[in-house]
Image (cartoon, rainbow, N blue to C red):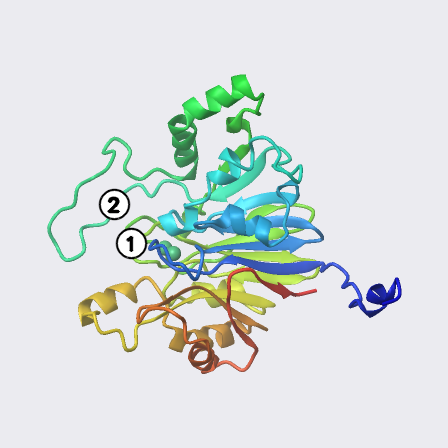
Amino acid sequence: MAAGASAATAAPRKKPAHLELVLLGTKAGPPIDPLRTGIASALVVDGATYVIDCGRSATTQYLRAGLTFKSLKGIFVTHLHADHIADYYNFFLLAGSVPNQEGDSLPGPIPVYGPGAAGGLPPTFGGGTSPTINPDSPTPGIAELTDDCHNAYAYSSNVFLRDMGIRDIRELADVHEIAVPSSAGATFENTAPQMAPFVVMEDENVRVSAILVPHGPVFPAFAFRFDTKYGSVTFSGDTTYTPNIPRLARDTDVLVHEAINVRGWRNGTPVFVDHLLQSHVEVQKVGPIARQSRARHLVLSHISDLRGNPLPVAQWRKWARGGYHGPVTIGEDLQRIRIA
Ligand SMILES: [Zn+2]
Ligand SMILES: [Zn+2]
């Protein structure tokens, strides 16, 4: 083959996207799954990266997706269930340490936006009592959680500070607890009253709004909407049915929504299924939410089919299309959705 032939036949290089959604991990819930990594997404706006939730393997998936830590402009956490934060501290502990082999590490302090303290715990489901971990502070918000991680890893950080000259990890996490407007009247006992969306953060690339969503006893649990000059993407977070989602997601370009399937699940008692559906939306009923939101594209992520693996994708697509006429994507780990 003549020199240059391969270059002549190579596919033309695509221009980088102005706005791209990257599904880092798409798995719902804490159990470790070999086929999907934990829920985490990235939104890339003109090369600046924003991470939404940091489930298991989020930092690894981030690099596998070709993103750089240098480009990270913010981390947004919808709520403090373990499946959304399992890899959160690794962004600082590991990616904030010395540069990797590609010379990449965090550029400096990274703004984090997430829940404040719940302020109370729910009663035990099914009655009885449950043990309480750390009774002096049993409902830490994202700021205390981060400080506690700093303290728990103090030995490693103190040694690396002396031995490798790493940066002070406490300065890399610039944590902001999201203040819910008091007019909403929300508490851990009234977790998601109907309310207006409110702005959480705005920079040169994005304006991020939030709204409370009902996710069983969890408080606060947020949905986030990112508006950019190229379009908008709305993340439901973990939620059951609520008018707050269509309100936040109105006319959004992409609605990234969670979904669960309980049909055909043999081990689920009706009481437990009902309990789960106070926290999640059935895949068979997600279409009408997208329609009501007038979303242009529905993407499912935070996926759980209680019948087990692997996910019957064609069946899920059929279910999710019910009641919605736009395109539907059943999310896969590392899938990229170019918006503009
Ligand atoms: Zn979850
Ligand atoms: Zn959750």
The kind of secondary structure element at disc 1 is loop
- Residue 35, how many percent across, how many down? 43, 62
Horizontal placement of 202 versus 292: left or right?
right
Q: Which residue is mark 1?
A: 217
Horizontal placement of 177 versus 152: left or right?
right
For residue 210, say whether it is visible.
yes
Q: Nearer the viewer, residue 10 or 43?
A: 10
Q: Nearer the viewer, residue 87 or 325?
A: 87
Type of the residue with mark 2: Leu
Q: Are marks 1 and 2 in contact (CB under 8 Å)?
A: yes
- Residue 253, how many percent across, how many down? 61, 68
- Residue 78, how many percent across, how many down? 45, 51
Q: Which quarter shows the N terminus? A: bottom right
Where's ligand 2: which quadrant?
bottom left
Q: Which quarter shows the C terminus? A: bottom right
Q: Is residue 50 above or below residue 268?
A: above
Residue in the picture at 30% in, 77% down: 263
For residue 185, say whether it is visible.
no
